[in-house]
Image: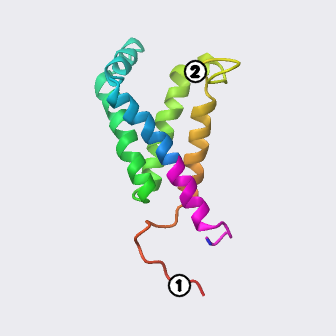
Amino acid sequence: MNRDGTPRAALLAFRVLVAMLIGIHGWYRLLHGGSPPFGDWLASQGIPLPHAIAWSITFGEILGSACLALGVCVRPIAILLMLVYATGIALLHAHEGWFVVGAGRNGSEYSVLLIASLALIAAAIRDPLWRPRARER
């Protein structure tokens, strides 16, 4: 258990689940040629270095998700990913409404859920999986 009474295994499972969701996003974009069109869209929004940013986000999701799952550099990666998803909300998703599917399309709800999940993970992380913990007495 963590100091606040939250089971460590539950937080680990949640962190790995969120890492998988983020990783799938990056891998899909990489394997299906999504980075060049993403860069083109960023260029249409007037974003400087749009293709470099698109590729950075793609590889950031792939590598960052692995680090999240392993418990490596969790807080900095979570903060960077939260900034990416918050920027996505500001540039695109907020204009599309709330819902991703159903009552709307391409809305903010999934990004908000990821941001909240990453914030929880960043706040709850204690240490990497392999670092020996001091015995709780």
In the displayed orientation, state which residue is furthest to the right.
103
Element under disc 1: loop
Report whether 49 appears left or right of 89: left
Can you say whether 125 is above or below 52 in the image? below
Can you tell which quarter of the image residue 46 is in? top left
Q: Nearer the viewer, residue 1 or 92?
A: 1
Q: Which of the 4 image quarters holds residue 29? A: top left
Q: Residue 6 colored magenta?
A: yes
Dot 2: element: loop
Image point (61%, 61%), residue name: 10
Where does the magenta region start and end?
2-17
Residue at 33% over, 38% down: 59
Give the labeled residue for mark 2. Answer: 106
Is residue 31 in the magenta section?
A: no
**Would you say 118 lies left or right of 6 here?**
left
Whichever of callouts 2 and 1 sits on the residue coming sooner in the sequence is: 2
Quadrant placement of the C terminus: bottom right
In terms of image quadrants, where is residue 110?
top right
